Image (tube, coloured by chain):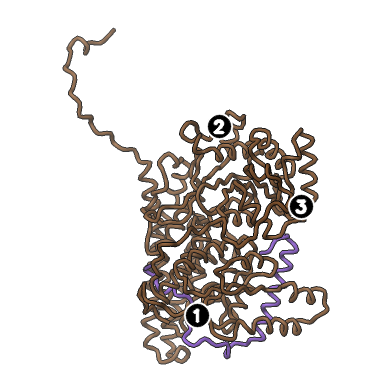
Amino acid sequence: MAANGNLLKGEVTESPSNEKKDVDELLRRLILALLSECKDETETGAPS
Amino acid sequence: MSASNSANEPRKKSRCLIIQLADLGSSLQSLMALRAVQQLYPELEIHFVIRDRFSDAAKRISWLKNVHSFPEEKFLGPLLNQTQTIDQGVKELANWVAPLSEHPWDFVINWSFSEASSYLTALIPAHVKLGYSRREDFTLSCMDGWSQYIQAIIQGGHQKSDVEQNIHLTDILTTQLLTALQIHLGEPKQNDDAAAVTSKNFFSIKGGFEQLGFTHKDLSKKWVSLQLQESHIPTQWNPEAWAKIALEITENHPEYLILLLADSRNNKNAELFFSELTRMGGDKEKVRSFVGEIDFEIWTSLIAKSHWLITGDSAATQLASVLGTRVLHIAIEPNQTSASGPYGNGHYVVSASASAKAVYGIWDYASQEWALRKQLTLQDHLTQLGAGDELQTLEVRRSKIRHLNEGGGVVFEPITNHSLKIKEWTSQVIGHIARSWYCGWVPPVCHEISRNQIEPSLIQALRAMDESSEVLERIYAQARLESETLSKKCSHLRSDKLMTLADRTEIENTGLKLKELDRLAEQLGELHSPLRAFSQLSKVFMHNLKGTHLAELSHESAEAYHQLGNGVAILRSWIKHTLDKVKPVAIQHAPVIPLPTRPHLTEPLL
């Protein structure tokens, strides 16, 4: 096992839930990010 | 979840969702990494999110529990042509995400390493997440070591940098997921029946070449596929160059049949290819064109049956790798070879500046290498073909999967006389540091570097960097000390906000000292590009500290500086070992019987 085992665990949540997160805002930002990636693809011709 | 299972105890099923919203080449690399994981953890239920247009690949894999196609065109089309508002788009997207969010996953692994994918990852509940996600304040979170490495080194942090590393992305993804599974689920099951990761049968394909117009004679021949790269990439690899290769192969090797592969964007190039081939006197009948008319199933069947694929296209390269078809890859983006070159044994990579004649010569050598290797070198072979001079400026590499005792993973060994440049030296060092941090195993320092690869320009660069790296090591030692002091100081505070003026001043001063040390580290990176890796890593580490209080944050900072200092120490040992390799060695007196002195010979001759 690596000396830095903690770094390899990832983000660990005991009781995962979306309750605290603003789901609508995440969705909105996801759409905007996809639109931005789509724009980059149109410019370069390839998915980023 | 905890790693309570022993290797042979039956384990409860765990559910793992992989998010891959990048291009087809990355999706294929992910599937290759998953195959290795699935063989070691057969009870793991693997679900895969992939862009709709690439989903044919994932849908043909029997061991994936479920494939969730991400219909980006359905979401984005109405927004782009303004028939829908963002809010309406959000509703549509929410409906698509809902089934994925119903029950928390054991693992959500985001292998896309993109902004959009980080929001999707944040939306899906899971006990363990790897890769990019978002915190509650929507800032980017990247909580595991390998993802931080990808962000800082492979993607170059916030600004694109030229620091390279030499670990293949397929190896990184495999190691990242296997380590996480080992931590959270326990040791993998012993699987003596594990098949090779790459295989002609990787995808479930119905096959059937007769309906594609192949005759029995065609089927009895060996096939070489030429895949034209995406037409937007500027390269000298134009239809004329491809036609020259096809001509050389068909004229000199009648036992081979050429397949020309490309998507419909290359229709014009295909026309040019055939007119050029005819102009040079080539036989069009010896080339089958599948330009613009193939789906994933046919494409896969053709590449699987081919003995070779010659291409500069990254997706085709990954597909051939998965299928175990040998690749001669024309490295249009050479700095991506280490991370995204063809995976497996015996593939060749040549720089894109190679002429068609040289590429043919390399293929000719590679396709007969077992017969030729013992008798003549690639240099001799190309000289016989009249392209020997070109080899002085070309880089030709051959892929090899290292033995497990040597650390495993793919390596691209130079097969031409090759002097080591500082960039490549750095890529080996950075790869070594990552293995030391995240694998717990490291190969001996410099063991893949031979003395004759080390040229004066490298020695000069290393000597110039030696002193600066020593300073950088001291900077991180000092930063660690300051952070520890800050952590001790803050742990005695009742609140992070309410404190005495003296405490506040002391904390502020320590913060300023740390800022200054970070600035100095960055300056050293500007002077010596290999050292830039550390300031890039430092930024990513510091952005991803998990603590919420000053005491925790400063304690984590101290650990991060300690890790960076350890990395610089590894780099310094590489400098030392590399310079030691070229130090003159005193020749010992040979144990021979001295000749008796003959006085007449001691007299001067004149």
Q: Amino acid at mark 3?
A: Asn
Instruction: State the residue in front, B580 or B181.
Output: B181
**Real-space Cα distance between discs 1 and 2?**
55 Å
Label 3 SS: helix
> Can you tell which mark lies on residue B266?
3
Letter of the chain that mark 3 sits on in the rendering? B
Identify the image quadrant of residue B159.
bottom right
Q: Is residue A22 above or below residue B570?
A: below
Kindly give the residue lying farthest to the top in the view shown: B606
Instruction: State the residue in front, B28 or B297.
Output: B297
- The residue lying at 70 percent from left, 77 percent from top is A31
**Labels 1 and 2: the sequence-earlier one:** 1
Q: Amino acid at mark 2?
A: His
> Can you tell which mark lies on residue B381?
2
Colour that chain B carries in the picture:
brown
Q: Amino acid at mark 1?
A: Asp
**Colour purple, chain:** A
The quadrant the C terminus of chain B occupies is top left
Letter of the chain that mark 1 sits on in the rendering? B
Letter of the chain that mark 2 sits on in the rendering? B
- The residue lying at 66 percent from left, 64 percent from top is A48
Instruction: State the residue in front, B330 or B261.
Output: B261
- The residue lying at 66 percent from left, 68 percent from top is B55
Please provide percent x and percent y for residue B35.
51, 64
